[in-house]
Image (cartoon, helix red, strand yellow):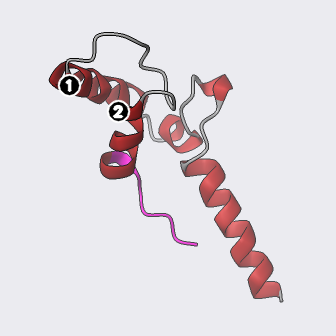
């Protein structure tokens, strides 16, 4: 029972820190801010937008599909639950 509770808490903390976007942090995750990845993410999004010819819209995550792709493939640390 205690192991189940600890696993659930670990899963929540991992999601909250690494996958949940925070509006007060300009839609970055806590981990993005803590590890200083914000500028890197914005630069990568600019590159992706340039390659795809996407000239409209904002770069703010999570609405930008390019950010979702980027975050799921390049910058996410492995979160162990």
Side of 72 relative to 24 (left or right): left
Q: Which label number is shown at residue 79?
A: none
The N terminus: image quadrant: bottom right
> In the rendering, at what x and y percent does residue 25 appear?
61, 26
Element under label 2?
helix
**In the image, which residues are magenta?**
75-81
Image height of 81 relative to 79, above or below: below
Q: How many marks?
A: 2
Residue 76 colored in magenta in the image: yes
Vertical arrangement, residue 70 with respect to residue 77, above or below: above
Near mark 2 (Cα within 10 A), the count class, few <14, some 14-19 or many ≥20, is many
Provide the major secondary structure of the magenta segment.
Answer: loop
**Position in image of residue 77 (x %, y %):** 41, 56
User: Outermost residue toward the right?
Assistant: 1
Residue 46's spot in the image, x, y percent?
A: 27, 20
Q: Earlier in the sequence, mark 1 or mark 2?
A: 1
The residue at which mark 2 appears reads as: 66
Q: Quadrant of the C terminus?
A: bottom right
Residue drawn at the location 31% of the way across and 26% of the way down: 45
- Residue 5 in the figure: left or right of residue 22: right
Q: Residue 13 appears in which quarter of the rendering?
A: bottom right
Residue shown at 50% from the left, 64% from the top:
79
Q: Are marks 1 and 2 in contact (CB under 8 Å)?
A: yes
Tell me the SS state at disc 1.
Answer: helix
Q: Which residue is mark 1?
A: 52
Cα separation, mark 1 vs mark 2, equals 9 Å
């Amino acid at each position: 029972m205690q192991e189940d509770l600890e696993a659930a808490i670990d899963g929540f903390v991992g999601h909250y820190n690494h996958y949940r976007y925070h509006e007060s942090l300009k839609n970055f995750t806590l981990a993005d801010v803590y590890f200083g990845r914000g500028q890197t993410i914005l630069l990568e999004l600019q590159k992706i937008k340039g390659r795809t010819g996407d000239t409209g819209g904002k770069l703010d995550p999570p609405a930008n599909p390019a950010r979702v792709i980027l975050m799921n493939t390049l910058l996410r640390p492995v979160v162990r639950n």
